[in-house]
Image (tube, rainbow, N blue to C red):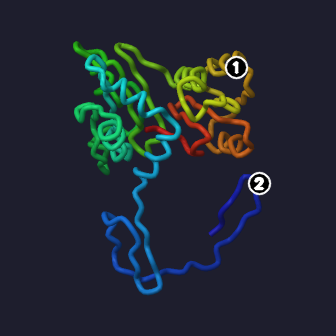
Amino acid sequence: MVVGGGGKKKMKISEIKMVDIPDVDLSHLGVTKYGKFSVEVVDPVFDYLELMEIVFNFSLIRSLLSLSDYRLVFDAMHAVAGAYAEPFFVDKLGASRISILNGLPLEDFGHGHPDLNLTYAKDLVNILYKENKPDFGAASDGTDGDRNMILGREFFVTPLDSVAIIAANAQNAIPYFQSGPKGLSRSIPTSGALDLVAEKLNLPFFEVPTGRKLFGILMDAGVLSICGEESFGTGSDHILEKDGI
């Protein structure tokens, strides 16, 4: 099997070694030994939560969600983000359990469509336009949780604008960026709002073809902190993949 690409030297896998062990109980955290072989089961939600507490000001968010006249709703779309939603928003930040929609991950996404937009996340959209509507709404895409959609009361933030809003307020609002972002980048189809933020903040700016790996190259080079693309994918160099939750 050949791996690699992108101009890099290709390598071949010449041997695959298999180990014959009983089925691993994935509900049991910790190390289990099978003779000389050991398997460690970790909780990715806990590890990710620890990282997010460094990136964001959880105490400030918690104080907002504790206000009696402020409500949020998050739609996990029956996908992987559902495993993170309750530990984050309910257990850690104090939101009500009814704030989480479609929080149980399902193989068929609850017979819904996994794409993230105003059409397939219409349940969330309708809630933000109803009487007695919440103040803030968000959704993560229905497959791998690497994209996000943001709504307000009867208001939709396009993916073209959300990354610009995040970048413009990052240094003041997000502890991870207290020294300021290193640089900003967007995909070609994404609007020029981010360009204006980069110019105003005197930050390096990069326009790239659609493709997450191009953002990753810039992050590895130490010249990019915040990026976004037209499909709701927003990310930063705290983790090189997109970051929906």
Instruction: Find residue 117 and report its horizontal and vertical position in percent.
Output: 42, 28
What distance separates the C-alpha of mark 1 from that of mark 2?
Answer: 35 Å
Work out which quarter of the rendered image holds the N terminus and state it.
bottom right
In the picture of the structure, the residue carrying the numbered disc 2 is 7
Tag of residue 201: 1
Query: Seen in the image, is 80 located left or right of residue 203?
Result: left
Earlier along the polypeptide chain: callout 1 or callout 2? 2
Circle 1 — which element?
helix
Q: Is residue 188 above or below residue 85?
A: above
Instruction: Find residue 170 and report its horizontal and vertical position in percent.
Output: 58, 26
- Residue 103: quadrant of the picture: top left
Tell me what residue is drawn at x 33 percent, y 22 percent. Answer: 125
Residue count near mark 2 (Cα–Cα under 10 Å), binned few <14, some 14–19, many ≥20: few
- Residue 227: quadrant of the picture: top right
Tell me what residue is drawn at x 34 percent, y 36 percent. Answer: 89
Viewer-side label of 1, 2: 1
Q: Is residue 175 above or below residue 218?
A: above
Tell me what residue is drawn at x 68 percent, y 71 percent. Answer: 12
Residue count near mark 1 (Cα–Cα under 10 Å), binned few <14, some 14–19, many ≥20: few
Residue kind at label 1, given as amino acid type: Leu
> Considering depth in this image, is 117 or 157 the residue closer to the camera?
157
Tell me what residue is drawn at x 63 percent, y 21 percent. Answer: 194
How many marks can you see? 2
> Considering depth in this image, is 78 or 244 the residue closer to the camera?
244
Q: Is residue 126 visible?
A: no
Instruction: Find residue 180 and report its horizontal and vertical position in percent.
Output: 66, 28
Q: Is residue 162 visible?
A: yes
- Residue 88: quadrant of the picture: top left
Circle 2 — which element?
loop
Instruction: Find residue 129 and report its horizontal and vertical position in percent.
Output: 29, 15
Residue kind at label 2, given as amino acid type: Gly
Q: Is residue 18 above or below residue 92?
A: below
